[in-house]
């Protein structure tokens, strides 16, 4: 039985037995390929690109494995995720993406080579891009509320001091 493409891709892309230099070269090459696909997709963002994994790999000049990696990366940004876990080269997939989600996911992945592509300028104006960027950055920030002092009124609304109510050690 042959292995699903995604498992094969993970074996290649996340191979701990390779030396650091080889891994860095692998990813540098992959990120260039990924960037070229995004440049084409973003040039016409409202047209749905659909086909088998093999057809799309050929269309974008990628190997089946590189296309698998691309599909793995974009899956969370698609309007309808592809069945990447069990996908084979003849599985029909769609690259129809949610523009805002894709932009935010690129920001979240710290992929400045992708969210700074000039194609975004014709999709979102600068103000919108900045707003999406900030929204994504803030979504990962944990904001703690003000600390309740032991002599402050209890936030539960009982009227008692916090230390005599919800702050009491059990």
Image (spheres, rainbow, N blue to C red):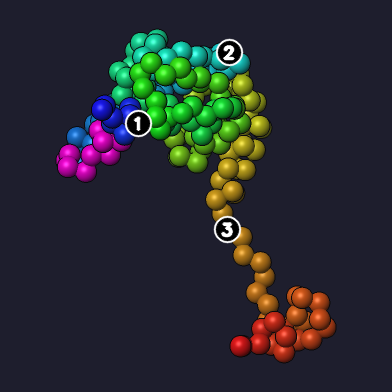
Task: Tell me residue 66's x, y (percent).
Answer: 33, 23
Mark 2 secondary-structure assignment:
loop
Secondary structure of the magenta portion, mostly? Answer: loop
Quadrant assignment for the C terminus: bottom right
User: What's the mark number on residue 6?
Assistant: 1
**Quarter assignment of residue 33:** top left
| Residue that carries the numbered disc 3 in the rendered image | 142
Q: Which residues fall within the magenta stretch?
A: 10-19
- Given residues 6 and 98, the one toward you in this image is 6
Camera-nearest label, 3 or 2: 2
Mark 1 secondary-structure assignment:
helix
Q: Residue at x 56, y 46 (%)?
A: 137
1 left or right, relative to 34: left
**How far is the residue under mark 3 from the one under mark 2?**
37 Å
Task: Tell me residue 43's x, y (percent).
Answer: 53, 14
Camera-nearest label, 1 or 3: 1
**Quarter assignment of residue 65:** top left
Task: Tell me residue 102's x, y (percent).
Answer: 54, 31
**How far is the residue under mark 2 from the one under mark 1?**
26 Å
9 left or right, relative to 153: left
- Given residues 54 and 30, the one toward you in this image is 54
Vertical placement of residue 169 versus 9, above or below:
below
Q: Can residue 146 be seen in this view?
A: yes
């Amino acid at each position: 039985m042959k292995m699903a493409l995604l498992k094969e891709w993970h074996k290649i892309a996340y191979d701990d037995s390779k030396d650091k230099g080889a891994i860095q070269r692998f990813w540098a090459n992959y990120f260039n390929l990924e960037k070229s696909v995004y440049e084409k997709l973003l040039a016409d963002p409202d047209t749905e690109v659909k086909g088998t994994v093999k057809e799309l790999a050929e269309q974008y000049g990628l190997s089946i494995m590189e296309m698998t990696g691309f599909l793995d990366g974009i899956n969370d940004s698609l309007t309808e995720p592809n069945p990447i876990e069990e996908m084979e080269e003849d599985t029909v997939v769609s690259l129809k993406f949610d523009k805002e989600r894709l932009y935010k996911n690129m920001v979240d992945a710290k992929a400045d080579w992708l969210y700074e592509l000039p194609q975004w300028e014709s999709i979102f104006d600068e103000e919108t891009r900045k707003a999406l960027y900030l929204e994504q950055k803030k979504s990962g920030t944990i904001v703690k509320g003000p600390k309740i002092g032991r002599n402050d009124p209890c936030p539960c609304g009982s009227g008692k001091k916090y230390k005599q109510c919800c702050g009491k050690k059990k």
